Image (cartoon, rainbow, N blue to C red):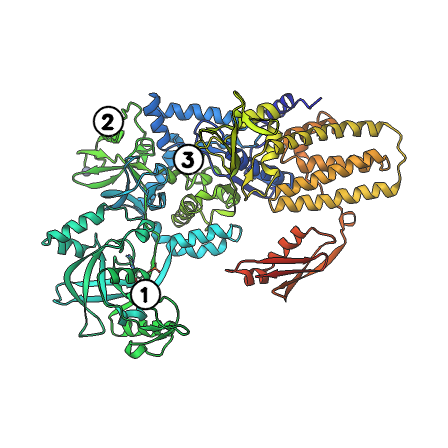
Amino acid sequence: MSYPFRSVEKKWQGTWQKLNAFQANTQSTKPKAYILEMLPYPSGRLHMGHVRNYTIGDALARYKRALGYEVLHPMGWDAFGLPAENAAMDNQVAPQLWIENNIAHMKQQLQSLGFGYDWTREINTSDPSYYEHGQKIFLNFYKRDLAFRKESWVNWDPVESSVLANEQVINGRGWRSGALVEKRKLNQWSLRITNYAQSLLEDLKLLTGWPEKVVRMQENWIGRSTGAQITFASKNDDFSLDIFTTRPETLFGASFCAIAASHPIAEMLAANNPELQEFVTSCLQMSTSEESLSTAEKKGHDTGKKIRHPLLPNTELPLFVTNFVLMDYGTGAIFGCPAHDERDFEFATLYHLPILPVIQPNAEPLSATQAYTGAGTMMNSQFLDGLTVEAAREKMLNFLETKTLGQRRTTYRLRDWCVSRQRYWGCPIPVIHCQNCGIVPVPEKDLPILLPEDVTFEHGQNPLDIHPTWKHVTCPTCQNPATRETDTLDTFFESSWYFLRYCCPQSPEPIDAETVKTWMPISWYIGGIEHAVLHLLYSRFFTKALRDGGFLNFDEPFEKLLTQGMVCHRTYQDEAGRWLYPSEVTSLNDQLVTVERHHPVIEGRSEKMSKSKKNLVDPVDIIETFGADTARLFTISDTPPDRDFDWSYEGLEGCWRYLNRLVRLKESLDQYQSQENKETPAASLTLRKTTHQMIVRITQSYERLVFNKAIAFARELTRTLEEALEAGLANHESIRECFETLLLTLNPMIPHLTSELWQQMRGSDQDIMNTPWPQADKALSAIDQVTIAVQVNGKLRGSFDAAIDSSQEILQEMALALPLVQRDAEGRTIRRVIIVPNRIVNVVV
Ligand code: ANZ
Ligand code: ZN
């Protein structure tokens, strides 16, 4: 007989709902913990990625609660965005309604998994009660010149018929549509995230609880470069050119200058040069993302103009317009030094320009077939000759500054964040355009600006723009006829601050600083790595911008970040190459065949679950067959949460069997308590020791979020208890203590079954949720320790204490965590780790 999970799970879900068990109390005097999973898009169905993400968060939140924290663990919906609009077009249903239905359905699915959320704080970003506050924040940014409108070249996604932010262009394509992005010159709203480039970069230092990888990705995205801005004059002195360089020491090796196609000087020169005009136009049509530029063929057009070398009176440099210089980086103009820059080398070879070496490599001869970009000694460079590259750079910078030919300059790769979208299903930007007054912010008393509901969707048109009346208003300042802004905000605007609103969902102002301060920063933020730059960078920017606007008083929103791995599954194809769902495949005489006709099936490798390859498992099926606890346990039992994990039916069944083992254990325990055993103090003590040692190990695993290890230890303890029951030598108290420890430590992961068994043990008025986390007794849990020496390439680098007979895996992990070892290993690959048990770990790099 297997345990009746349906009734048990329903019972506990009902109890939690009735008790409002997860409502967070701001007034509580307990220490606070804020655990958050990234809010989902309400597509209508939960997928396994959600289940894993939310199980991790829920296990953590319940654990913190058991430790005595007042826990905030809310949930909401990132509800604006294109899919709702597409569904509206496809199914003739209003986006509002489509979203509402999806939310209702997904909420019910979340509840059936037993996740403990404080639903009184639920946020739907498309609800006016939320976006009204987004509009207030926008106006505040506008007042502070952090939101601005200007005509500029923007990324145009032809499939979405809308503009995209730089962060949303990936390899030259739209992040959602996959379409090749075009450049358009449009009047758009942007946020001045670049004002914060330096502090976004500097404060990465504070994020010691973030994965190194994500910190690196943000650092690269912000892309700080230091160098010089140098002014070059044209031969006829009809214009001057400011260039940006990170290599001023190579100035004597300059052989040409180049500017972007959208540089004002290119525009000026093209005005009476039709050929140049044609070239400029063709460049502008091309995608200009950095990635596509670095791979695209370098093209240039000689303007015929000559530029004077600032330090060599007799040298003239040709001026090119090129496709590889970006207008919005540095000054949009460069000098080219082909001998020491690969791109310039390629260009010079193509256009037969001189290649003038100015750096002599220290060890090798100069190559004639490629640029030399390494260190060396300066040559052909007058006052720099003989210096190292570094020293020459300093000397040149000082020289340029004393002669006022240029100055030191720092630039960032980060661009201002374009937030205008030409779509209906987004938050209306609360401004009015008036012929007399220009841009007029909507007065706060008129907020929220609501979306009209009677709209028509026509392909390629913004429904707000073609609506007969919505945009026609009177100017709040001069009372003349005026029009509303018809662009809506990028949905990333709403998701950049929703976590603040969860703290004070009823506040009449967007943010109640006092309340927000009690909960923020978020202790653990859990979500996908795909947001490493986009959402996480925007949220950090909002936090800083809101701080400077007096809305709050801290610098960073997310103390610790966990980027969870993917849920993967093997793929299946029939002989014709068609993808098959796992449910369409069965095994017959050890061969994989289709369920229906027993045709042969070809098994592929495990890949991220995706619709296109059909390697999906529907959480609903799993919950219905095995229950929520099995599904929860399985998604976190196999691998640490930040790694990918392979879905397997066998693994799932293993978890199901384990739950049943716990049920049987309770039955054996009842029997044990009612019978005479030949108890010995030694056996009881041994059992108690194991129990308390396991409390330490399991607690440590929770602290490090390695639930798979916590589960492995719990399974070990289960085995010990089964053996003790069998042997019949331990006393009732030690047996009971062991079982209760198991229930308490498993509760965050499998809350339904453990709640039920707890009640059976302790009585119907008892709730495991109100029982604190078990404390290990120091004397009982003491494990014999040994000191392990750690070497890197044979040199002593430190030591640490570990439990005697610790596994190789644990020893390796602890050794690699030593700061000195990390320093030695940085930027190198670890080739081997040699372990002498209980003595030495030697890391070979
Ligand atoms: C002369 C030079 C000599 C350069 C040399 C490099 C090597 P990062 O590190 O990415 O900041 N550059 C400047 N502005 C540019 C723009 N708008 N579009 C394309 N390229 C641009 O690189 C800065 C270097 O990229 C600058 O230093 C400049 O070329 C180029 F041996 O100046 B360099
Ligand atoms: Zn006006």
Q: Is residue 473 visible?
A: yes
Look at label 1 and name its amino acid: Thr
Q: Position of residue 115 (x, y in %)?
A: 56, 31
Please determine whether, in this image, residue 42 is positioned above or below residue 165.
Answer: above
Q: Nearer the viewer, residue 614 or 22?
A: 614
**Residue at the location (36% across, 43% down)?**
168
Look at label 2 and name its amino acid: His
In this figure, which residue is indicated by the disc labeled 2? Answer: 467
Q: Cα distance, mark 2 to mark 1?
A: 61 Å
Residue 754, quarter of picture: top right
Q: Is residue 27 left or right of residue 431?
A: right
Q: Nearer the viewer, residue 207 or 52?
A: 52
Please determine whether, in this image, residue 447 is positioned above or below residue 331.
Answer: above
Q: Which mark is residue 369?
A: 1
Residue farthest along the left direction in this orientation: 272
Secondary structure of the residue carrying numbered label 3: loop
Q: Indicate which disc, 3 or 1, sits on the residue closer to the N terminus.
A: 1
Query: Where does ligand 2 appear, by image quarter?
Result: top left
Q: Position of residue 677 (x, y in %)?
A: 88, 32
Q: Is mark 3 within 8 Å of ligand 2?
A: no
